[in-house]
Image (tube, rainbow, N blue to C red):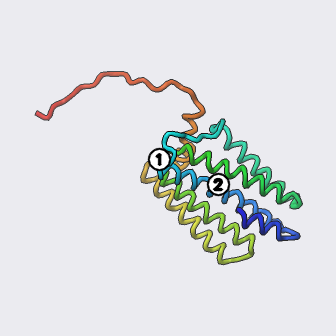
Amino acid sequence: MTTSIASFMDTSHATMLHSVASFLGVFIGGVTMTGSLAAYRKLANLYKNKKMNLPYAAYLNKPIALANAAGLALICTKPSLGVPLLSMSALTSSVMGWNITNNIGSADMPVAITVFNSYSGWALCAEGFMLNNPLLTVVGSLIGSSGAILTYIMCKAMNRSLDNVIFGSYADLASAAKPMEITGTHTETNVE
């Protein structure tokens, strides 16, 4: 995030590619940073009795994603607003990363970690475009695509979709439905 903001501030006349790469670097970097911190907190069993949920957690991600999409469109048309837009993206993407990861169940955390591994590669790829460095672009795309392939393989092995892993807990947060009741009879058998 800081490299993208500093590179944008250092450039007097940002091109469209530089603006888009800077914005994507900040957004993906923010989600990855706070998401990784939330994953570490869960896996290290820190603050065991505290959920640390954000207020209205189930309703934050869509407005944040829309605000960042609008920010990306605005930075392309008005690069003079770049630093405030990048700062807004750094803040909102950090909230989004924490919000998503904090609500993932511990059994799904390895998939989330591979997603963040992939995200870090895509952020590096964006940084390669931003700094006009082909090596960063190639290495970032390799890390991003290998992380995406590993994520796909892990989801298939768990018989779950990525949407279900990442956003599955929001159905529980958003709905206050009554738990399912168990009905019927059972028959016990004996080996003999």
In the image, taking residue 153 as reference, residue 21 lies left or right, namely right
Q: Position of residue 104 (x, y in %)?
A: 53, 45
Residue at (60%, 40%) from the top-left corner?
Answer: 53
Q: Position of residue 188 (x, y in %)?
A: 21, 27
Disc 2 residue crowd, few under 14, some 14–19, many 20+, Cα 10 Å: many
Count of marks placed on residues: 2
Disc 1 residue crowd, few under 14, some 14–19, many 20+, Cα 10 Å: some
Residue 69, relative to residue 54: is it above or below?
below
> Which of the marked residues, 1 or 2, is nearer the chain's N terminus?
2
Residue at (68%, 77%) from the top-left corner?
Answer: 134
Q: Residue furthest top?
A: 184
Q: Secondary structure at mark 1?
A: helix
The mark found on residue 175 in the picture is none
Q: Image quadrant of residue 184?
A: top left
Look at the image and tell me in which quarter the N terminus lies: bottom right
- Residue annotated with mark 1: 106
Q: Image quadrant of residue 135?
A: bottom right
Residue 80, relative to residue 135: is it above or below?
above
Closer-to-camera residue (18/12): 12
CB contact under 8 Å: marks 1 and 2: no
Residue 78, relative to residue 165: is it above or below?
below
- Residue annotated with mark 2: 31
Residue 176, relative to residue 119: is it above or below?
above
- Distance of label 1 from label 2 (alpha carbons): 18 Å
- The amino acid marked with disc number 1 is Ser
Residue at (63%, 39%) from the top-left corner?
Answer: 57
Q: Secondary structure at mark 2?
A: helix
Residue at (78%, 69%) from the top-left corner?
Answer: 7
Closer-to-camera residue (169/155): 169
- The amino acid marked with disc number 2 is Val
Look at the image and tell me in which quarter the C terminus lies: top left
